[in-house]
Image (tube, rainbow, N blue to C red):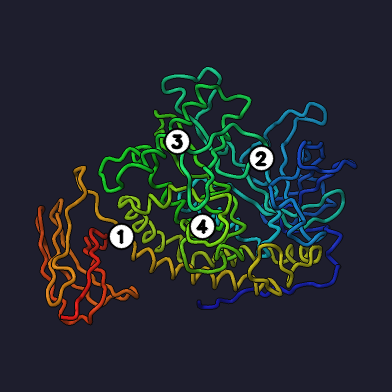
């Protein structure tokens, strides 16, 4: 990568920032539990004061807070709550809080915090094992640029019971509602017709935390023997009716049955009519770009609105990317090469309890999905997913975090110390930033090549699989490629060796709709295996594995 001028961060070993905070360029959130201890359920009462002068002004604790409010606060997350993998005393805990009307009623109320839309439920992400404080933020930023629903975020510094707690990422909790996931309300009387068709928010995740109503998939995924579990996040367990539960369960079951059993080369598969293809494509690209080791199988959300509002299964909102962009030492999460969607199927040893849903392996055999991925990747690489665009966002963010990071790592001296499941452990902020940017450059380069090689036979306007063949195969001097065309097109041929190198590329000219036979002289090739592709305007139509024989 080309190194640009980065403002240097000096790691402050001294504890001058360790116990106090008086002024910050970030909003300051002061929390007072009034002597009570925060636990993982139930929420306890706390007084919150927010110092946020906006417009780039510095925030000071000696000033009057922008406003104060009561809230219920608790620990949140699963593995992030424990010290058993971590460094006791050096790892911050994540929190969730719900804004309450007062100190007595414990009824939720909505407020706008740090210029984000008003809501009652919020998350304080500790970013406990990401010393860049960038991975979750970058993923949310990119998901928004790609068109996926996402959580809006702001950095804050937190003081808890007069003790400085460092940088936190204030995030919108994923929930149904006009200021969050704007899908239809479901009430107890919405049990038939269009009323019952949405909206639903469903999660694939561990079952820790608040209980939800759910069901097991009918299908085993990956190498394990467990069937995935779907949890209904909205409507809540206490509110959902039996008609609503049965509707969304039957809809997802029908989608899975079609995806599992139908031929992906058919033009009229049931599952395609039930899914929002662009969201599945964008979600796939986000997980693969970030090489999220938990991607697809944990912290994964999808939703369905009413039929009258589109009513298809839609991936998102995006959530939980702290173990992405090279920040995991297992399942090859530190490598910039390799797919995520099929990694668990290729991993030796005891299968992970949480397997990747079979959906993604099936979709990677579907020509509509694969060609959509190729087109979308090509488009995004020219804009949001260029390394220069990504690094500009990362650089500007880390500049804004310069002094808060000095305070944070004065309080929690984690440079040079591994926090599970780190692979790379930098000695300072620059080490961490440069390593992550180098990793992203390598990941994009790998995906450029890997996505270019993806192929799927074009879906034709009939139920039968397309009749394509290369003959004779193996071939000595000449080989013929036979395939149908559904329209008049200009074609191009490319021939690859097994290392993915292009050894022949040439235009084939204009061809009319109907059957086509292309003779090809392969006499200059050395004996061995090759792949021939036929393209229309850089879009893959057909792929022919061939063998050049010795004679």
Q: Secondary structure at mark 3?
A: helix
Q: Which part of the image, by quadrant, shows the C terminus?
A: bottom left
Residue under label 3, please give it. Answer: 252
The numbered mark, 2 or 4, whose residue comes first in the sequence reads: 2
| Residue sitting at x 64%, y 37% | 118
Residue under label 2, please give it. Answer: 112
Left or right, 35 with reference to 454? right
CB atoms of marks 2 and 1 within 8 Å: no
The numbered mark, 4 or 3, whose residue comes first in the sequence reads: 3
Q: Name the front one of labels 2 and 1.
A: 1
Q: Quadrant of residue 261?
A: top left
Residue under label 4, please give it. Answer: 344
CB atoms of marks 3 and 1 within 8 Å: no
Residue under label 1, please give it. Answer: 455
Residues 448 and 213: in front is 213
Mark-to-mark CA distance, 2 and 3: 35 Å
């Amino acid at each position: 990568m080309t190194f640009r001028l980065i403002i240097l961060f000096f790691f402050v070993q001294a504890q001058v920032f360790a116990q106090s905070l008086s002024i910050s360029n970030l909003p300051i959130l002061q929390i007072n539990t009034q002597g009570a201890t925060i636990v993982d359920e139930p929420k306890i009462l706390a007084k919150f004061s927010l110092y946020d002068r906006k417009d780039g002004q510095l925030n000071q604790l000696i000033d009057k807070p922008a406003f104060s409010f009561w809230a219920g606060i608790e620990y949140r997350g699963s593995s992030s709550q424990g010290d058993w993998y971590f460094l006791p005393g050096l790892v911050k805990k994540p929190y969730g809080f719900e804004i309450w009307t007062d100190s007595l009623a414990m009824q939720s109320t909505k407020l706008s915090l740090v210029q984000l839309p008003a809501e009652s439920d919020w998350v304080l992400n500790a970013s406990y094992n990401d010393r860049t404080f960038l991975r979750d933020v970058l993923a949310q930023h990119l998901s928004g640029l790609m068109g996926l629903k996402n959580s809006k975020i702001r950095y804050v510094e937190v003081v808890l019971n007069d003790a400085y707690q460092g940088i936190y990422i204030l995030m919108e909790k994923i929930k149904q509602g006009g200021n969050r996931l704007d899908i239809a309300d479901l009430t107890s009387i919405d049990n038939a017709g269009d009323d019952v068709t949405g909206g639903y928010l469903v999660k694939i995740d561990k079952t820790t935390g608040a209980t939800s109503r759910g069901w097991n998939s009918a299908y085993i995924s990956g190498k394990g023997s467990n069937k995935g579990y779907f949890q209904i996040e909205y409507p809540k367990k206490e509110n959902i009716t039996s008609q609503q539960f049965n509707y969304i369960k039957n809809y997802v079951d029908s989608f899975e049955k079609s995806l599992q059993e139908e031929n992906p080369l058919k033009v009229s598969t049931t599952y395609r009519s039930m899914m929002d293809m662009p969201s599945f494509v964008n979600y796939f690209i986000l997980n693969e770009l970030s090489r999220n080791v938990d991607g697809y199988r944990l912290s994964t959300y999808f939703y369905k609105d009413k039929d009258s509002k589109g009513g298809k299964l839609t991936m998102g909102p995006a959530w939980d990317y702290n173990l992405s962009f090279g920040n995991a030492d297992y399942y090859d999460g530190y490598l910039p090469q390799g797919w995520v969607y099929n990694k668990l199927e290729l991993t030796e040893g005891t299968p992970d309890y949480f397997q990747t849903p079979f959906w993604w392996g099936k979709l990677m055999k579907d020509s509509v999905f694969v060609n959509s991925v190729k087109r979308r990747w090509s488009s995004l690489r020219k804009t949001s997913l260029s390394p220069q665009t990504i690094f500009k966002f990362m650089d500007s963010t880390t500049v804004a975090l310069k002094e808060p990071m000095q305070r944070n790592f004065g309080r929690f001296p984690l440079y040079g110390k591994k926090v599970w499941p780190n692979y790379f452990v930098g000695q300072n902020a620059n080490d961490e930033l440069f390593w992550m940017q180098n990793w992203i450059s390598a990941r994009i380069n790998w995906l450029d090549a890997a996505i270019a090689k993806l192929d799927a036979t074009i879906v034709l306007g009939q139920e039968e699989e397309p009749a394509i063949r290369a003959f004779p195969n193996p071939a000595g001097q000449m080989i013929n490629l036979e395939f149908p065309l559904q329209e008049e097109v200009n074609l191009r041929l490319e021939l690859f060796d097994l290392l993915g190198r292009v050894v022949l590329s040439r235009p084939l000219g204009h061809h009319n709709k109907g059957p086509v036979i292309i003779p090809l002289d392969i006499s200059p090739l050395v004996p061995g295996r090759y792949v021939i592709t036929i393209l229309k305007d850089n879009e893959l139509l057909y792929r022919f594995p061939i063998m050049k024989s010795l004679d």
